[in-house]
Image: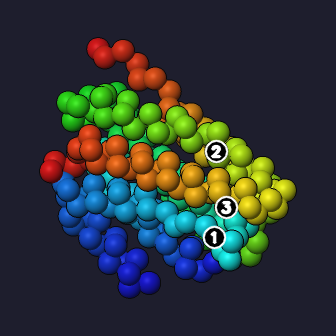
Amino acid sequence: MDTAAVLALIEKGIAIIPILIQFGQDIAPAIEILKNVVTGAQAGTITDEELAQNEAELDALIADFNADLPPAS
Amino acid sequence: MKRIVLALVLGLSLGGCAQFQKFQDALTLTTATVTNPVTKDRLNDLEAGIRIVFAGLKAYKSACINGTADVHCRTNIQQIQVYTRQVPVPLAQLRAFVKNNDQINATIVYNNLVTLITNAKQAAANAGINLGAS
């Protein structure tokens, strides 16, 4: 994994954390993403299993955001 | 490392528009070229970046549902969804191209995906998404 890319991802991840805190959201998922990025960088090339796991989590996140908003109360 | 620490300090000390700027920064992605191929590691980097972006969007949506975001949040989210709902298709295509090492198509789709995310970012900016009290 490219070191510059890893650092850029970590910086982006850190930048998003205050936003999560501001909206009272759990920061654990964002921390987990960063942890996975660092772990992957330490391990070298990502494995197919790790990639598949990360992709499944991303797909769930995208589907969650793309779902219709519930009716306004 | 200093840069990361600085980003953390700034992120925690600045509010309002600075938060939104950071949100926009988080959406910034680089383009791929023939000399800069889309490897599995690079795909994973891109997906990690998108995950971080969607973590922020999800936070905004959750706050909107809970009534703690701005009054225009529902419209803002719907405008952003115009772009984010287009993401799954090219993302799936990109994954397939990378795994088949079809670099020509992978590069095209990668850059299309980056453009799509950039458009989503622009939609957020046009909608004046107020992730803080700006």
* Mark found first going from the N terminus, 2 or 3: 2
Which mark is on residue B33?
1
Classify 10 Å Cα crowding around label 1: few (below 14), some (14-19), many (20 and above).
some
Q: Amino acid at mark 2?
A: Pro
Give the number of the disc on residue B18: none
Answer left or right for A39 relative to B114.
right
Determine whether, in the image, residue B129 is placed left or right of residue B79: left
Q: Secondary structure at mark 3?
A: helix
> Who comes first in sequence, dot 1 or dot 3?
1
As measured in the structure, the alpha-carbon distance from the residue carrying label 2 to the one carrying label 3 is 11 Å
Query: Which residue is depicted at the point 44% across and 70% down?
Result: A11
Question: Measured from the top left, where is residue B70 in percent x and y?
Answer: 21, 35
Q: Which residue is mark 3?
A: B107
Q: Do labels 2 and 3 touch, CB within 8 Å?
A: no
Alpha-carbon span between mark 1 and mark 3: 6 Å
**Residue A51 visible to an observer of this rendering:** no
**Which chain is disc 3 placed on?**
B
Judge the density around disc 2: few (<14), some (14-19), many (≥20) Cα neighbours within 10 Å. Answer: some
* Residue type indicated by callout 1: Thr
Horizontally, residue B93 falls left or right of residue B11, namely: right
Subunit ID for the residue under disc 2: B
Label 2 sits on residue:
B90
| Horizontal and vertical percent position of residue B26 | 41, 60
Q: Secondary structure at mark 1?
A: loop
Q: Are marks 1 and 3 on the same chain?
A: yes
- The residue at 23%/61% (across/down) is B18
Q: Quadrant of residue A33?
A: bottom right
* Front residue (pair A66, B31): B31
Picture residue at 77% right of the left edge, 54% below the top: B97
